[in-house]
Image (cartoon, grey):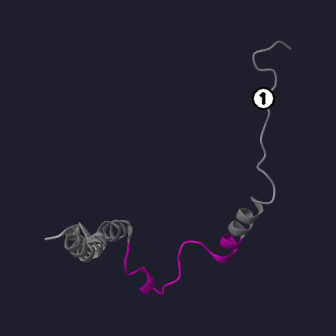
Amino acid sequence: MSLAQFFAQRGRVLPLLGTMALFAGCASTTPVADSHFGEAVRAARAAQTLNPQASANRDPVKGIDGQAGSAAMERYQDSFKSPPKTFEILNIGGSL
């Protein structure tokens, strides 16, 4: 085999090897882990759900009347309008 024939064969093989290397990079290396993807999130959500059928319950909430609920909401909204009252302790560690 002459040097020209060697490089001619090599010129056909190198692009093929490069293409194969690119496709190998796309292959999944963790098929078992990929098949379980998202299970931890679904399990955590299920563990934190108190009543999965809560949306089917159409009964109104009992225990507080409309006036008390409205007053509580107003106080809650007003708490954001002005900062809470604080107090100041004077003369700590000093003399009068």
- Left or right: where 28 falls relative to 44: left
In the picture shown, does residue 58 fall above or below 79?
below
Main SS of the magenta segment?
A: loop
Quarter assignment of residue 21? bottom left
Quarter assignment of residue 91? top right
Q: Secondary structure at mark 1?
A: loop
Q: Is residue 61 magenta?
A: yes
Q: Nearer the viewer, residue 95 or 49?
A: 49
**Which residue is painted at 77% across and 62% down in the image?**
78
The segment highlighted magenta reads 51-70
**Which residue is painted at 76% across and 49% down in the image?**
84
Q: Nearer the viewer, residue 61 or 10?
A: 10
Q: Quadrant of the C terminus?
A: top right
**Which residue is painted at 31% across and 66% down in the image?**
40
**Which residue is painted at 75% across and 16% down in the image?**
93
Q: Is residue 45 magenta?
A: no
Q: Which residue is identified by label 1? A: 89
Q: Quadrant of the N terminus?
A: bottom left
Coordinates of residue 7 in the picture (x, y in percent): 24, 70
Give, as a three-letter code, the residue at label 1. Answer: Ile
